[in-house]
Image (cartoon, rainbow, N blue to C red):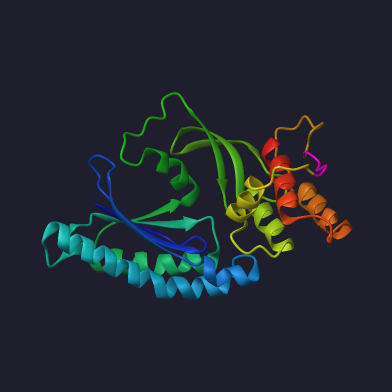
Amino acid sequence: MILSIESSCDDSSLAITRFADHKLLFHTKLSQDSHHSPFGGVVPEIASRLHAQNLPILLEKIKDFLCATYDTHTPFALLKAIAIANRPGLSVTLSEGMCMANALALSLKIPLLCLNHLKGHIYSLFIDKPTQIGDGLGVLLVSGGHTQILHMRDYHHITLVAQSLDDSFGESFDKVAKMLSLGYPGGPIVESYAKNYGGTLLPMPIPLLHDKRLAYSFSGLKNAVRLEIARAQDTLSKEQICASFQEAACTH
């Protein structure tokens, strides 16, 4: 079994996976959304402190699971490796996970596997099933600060096909939500407002509509939202703004 640790941004997560069949046996997470919501985005120093508090709590849950499931008083002896996301991400939060991973690997005398967490997103497609990449895998990766299209041949051979020229998809949703004082994370909130609106949409630009480059761009669309808010703040509803932004972003 492998113990995996994730602390690349604002969620503390631990999981136990079985080698033989890729089976996810147990996972646990503590979210920080309520702590960052007043600021409209992740505050790295707060995130780091919360990881320092939350990771030991989650490790105790892992210990309880292993003890109860395998009837043992030395649960960590069952582990054969520690996997840790060490890039990309916020350095101050990644270091918290690295500290725990290093301590566990050294004390248990088992391998430490340092992994790219974006590759982890791709391999999450194969949880509880065989990894089947075949002749290649086309991937749309929309994760935090990353909006990319990738062609993957295997773990070591991944080609970047396209990416955002400026803001990421998720970041744009967060910033629009912040402009409207909707809270954090912005994506689900903007989406909920958009779903409840059935009226006329605002004329938002579709980014790179006449550009032949294979790329994304969201900064202009985000700025268009800002201008609409400033132009008619008293007459526009939040539902109308959210629906117009989401329509243009998803069409792009």
Q: Position of residue 161 (x, y in %)?
A: 62, 34
Q: Which sits in the foreground, 207 or 226?
A: 226
Would you say 229 lies left or right of 41 here?
right
Magenta region: which residues?
A: 202-206
What residue lies at 49% left-to-right and 60% top-to-bottom? 8
Would you say 79 lies left or right of 30 here?
left
What residue lies at 22% left-to-right and 61% top-to-bottom? 65
Vertical side of 197 occupied by 35: above or below: below
Which image quarter is the C terminus in? top right
Q: Which sits in the foreground, 102 or 68?
A: 68
Would you say 68 lies left or right of 13 here?
left
Q: Quadrant of residue 29?
A: bottom left
Give the residue furthest to the right.
231
Q: Quadrant of residue 22?
A: top left
Give the residue furthest to the top.
135
Q: Is residue 24 magenta?
A: no
| Magenta part, dominant SS | loop
Q: How many marks?
A: 0
Vertical side of 37 occupied by 130: above or below: above
Would you say 242 lies left or right of 97 here?
right
Q: Position of residue 104 (x, y in %)?
A: 29, 66
Vertical side of 182 occupied by 118: above or below: above
Q: Position of residue 155 (x, y in %)?
A: 43, 38
Q: Position of residue 192 (x, y in %)?
A: 60, 51
What residue lies at 41% left-to-right and 75% top-to-bottom? 53
